[in-house]
Image: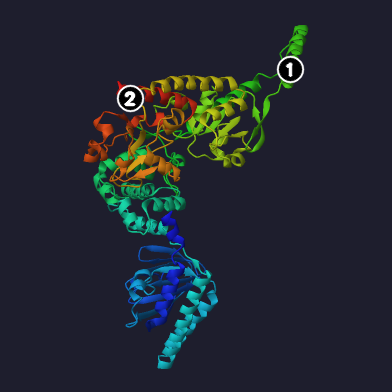
Amino acid sequence: MADEVCLTKRFTPDMIEDAIWLWARSSITLLDVRYSLLDPANAIEDYIMPASTMLYVYGGSGDVRLNQTMYPLERYNLFHGGKGTELTIHPTSPRLELYMVFYKAKSPSHNRRELPRLKEQAKPFDQVYGFSPGNPLFFAKKFHDMHISWGTGSALGHLQAKSSFYQLVHELYKELERGDISYIDPDYAEWVRQYLDKHFTEPISIQQLAEMLPISRSLLSKLFRKREQKSLQEYLNEKRLEAAMKGLQDTQATIQEIAVGSGFMDELNLIRMFKKQTRMTPSEFRRKMITESTNNDIDNHYHRLYNGKGLAGLVKSKEDGELSMFGLSGNKTVILAAAMSLMLLLSACGTAAPANNTGSANSNSTQTESNSEATAAEQSPTTRTVQTVKGEIEVPINPQRVVVNWYAGDVYALDLNIVGYSGWAQETMPFYDKLMDSIKIENWEPEDVMALDPDLIVTYDEADFDKFKSIAPVLVVPETDITSLERVKIIGEATGREELANEAVATFEAKLAEAKEKFKGSAFEGKTFSILEDWGPSGDWSGIAYETESRGGTLVYHHLGLQIPQKVQELIDSGQGRGTLSYEVAHEYFGDYILWFRQEGTDSEYQKTEIWKSLPAVTENRLVEIPGNYQGLFYYSDVLSLTAQLDYMVDAINSLAQ
């Protein structure tokens, strides 16, 4: 929170009063007044201010960087920086007007009783800031007058310029006192983006990058993700991957040379990232590009790897670069469409008139029975009205083709058929095999959902209602204010599967009751439990991550009722239900028992420290290490996942007590 405050509030009343005191008693010397017209071809790059400088920028768009702080330009902008401040201005419009006033201030040399205190709290001649003034035309006129007066070169003209400067400063602090000035919030996210664009081929630590700015790493990550819709590390990986693709396509360099030249640590790192994002190795990609460049009319429709925003339209590769004709997820959809077309064709052929009219009585009898059955079917209701957060909706009584956003476990507990899902799948999930029989929806958009022809869409997101309601009924069950057990009952009642929902909940609650009895033993009395994972000493989310809901937290704390360490509880009470702790202080938050999630394929650096080796939970064998490939088991909190987590956790913890 302190970081967010520093973005919007830089001048307290005391700071303003002290700054005015210094301005009134200091000797000000104007050194120069300049005017420039800027455009994208005439930007200012890395200019070091030779003295304290006041700038007025208006009439166009772009951004201004003072030292490491990036400011987006508004209509009228007043900036200030002390001597040595680094200035960069990037116009994005054809015309941007700039006034620069260079001055030198000499503090009072007598009556200095208050000066030491003032110098500690107020440094108006060195301070870096950006404002959008409340009376922008006054400032525009004063800067213009200063430039004209200064340009005469006469002593009288310079005196007039100095007089205008004092009037400008007076208006500035008058607006500050009244609160009429609007602070221009620094655009740290844009600065970081530009920095990564220039330096992505170099070794970059996200932690070191954050230390270059006056905000915390967590706030920087939050601002960047809000702006770019991806994390800092994801953006950096994407830039490096783009460079690697270009190198593979345009040069004959080796994979190792391309890896190093693109910013990857080594060839193995590049290959791992390449396969993760494109589902092919760098060598396969290079062969594919060579093939397409010589025969660009074959199958190009399927092979776009980058669309200007990110990787898209990726295709599966087989062995020596052979490409699957159906691409990512289109295979099942295309096969289904073909099958439906064939059925319609056969159906059309079968409705022709009969070849003869013999046996008309039997035919009439059969027709009568069919009509009766059809009438009965027409009279039976096929939908039910359900009250939801989005009002009343009509839900199929027996939905056959369900598309689900996140709630796959709940829907499978009700024995419904999922034809498509949005979410993550991993082999230790209790319903993984069923998920593999459905289609993962890579882009949660109407076109992709419509292709699956669902008769019901189940989601947690209220925004999905308007997004998909024209395709099929949308059952919205928000995650807030209900437990996962209540959630499956709500979905069960809406779809006519109340009995199955109750059975799934009863199975879990019976196992839960048995588990609670086991945790009443003396080995667990008064003991606390921590859920932790090592994210490494550096990176986008470094340190020891603690969880209170994810990674089995819902089961451990909310259902089993195991005790949370006091210091972690304090974090929860302050609104920090999950986060990371530095290596230096993490041990203070560890409980008597540690549920330690390992990251797959990575050794924990924290487990190599002496602090770890001296932890009571480690020395006294109260440590449950959960392998990295079991992340999927603890990913969701639906009733099926909770039941499977319960079996795993109870066995693991009880084995320590024995």
Left or right, 618 with reference to 63: left
Instruction: Pick the residue in front: 205 or 121.
Output: 121
Q: Nearer the viewer, residue 170 or 259?
A: 170
How far across and how far down the image is residue 386, in percent? 66, 30
Question: Which residue matches tag 1?
Answer: 376
Q: Is residue 73 left or right of residue 107?
A: right
Q: Quadrant of the C terminus?
A: top left
Number of numbered markers: 2
Which amino acid type is shown beneath numbered disc 2?
Ala
The answer to which quarter of the image holds residue 481 is top right
Q: Which label's residue is closer to the chain start, 1 or 2?
A: 1
Q: Pointer 2: what residue?
A: 523
Residue drawn at point x = 64 percent, y = 29 percent: 395
State the residue in front, 612 or 457.
612
| Drawn side of residue 380 relative to residue 276, left or right | right
Q: Secondary structure at mark 1?
A: helix
Residue at image point 31% right, 41% down = 588
Q: Nearer the viewer, mark 1 or mark 2?
A: 2
* Residue 447 showing in the rendered view: yes
x and y percentages locating residue 200 in the rendered image: 32, 53
* 180 relative to 646, above or below: below
Q: Which kind of residue does numbered mark 1 sit on?
A: Ala
Neighbour class for label 1 at 10 Å: few (<14), some, many (≥20)?
Answer: few
- Disc 1 from disc 2: Cα separation: 64 Å
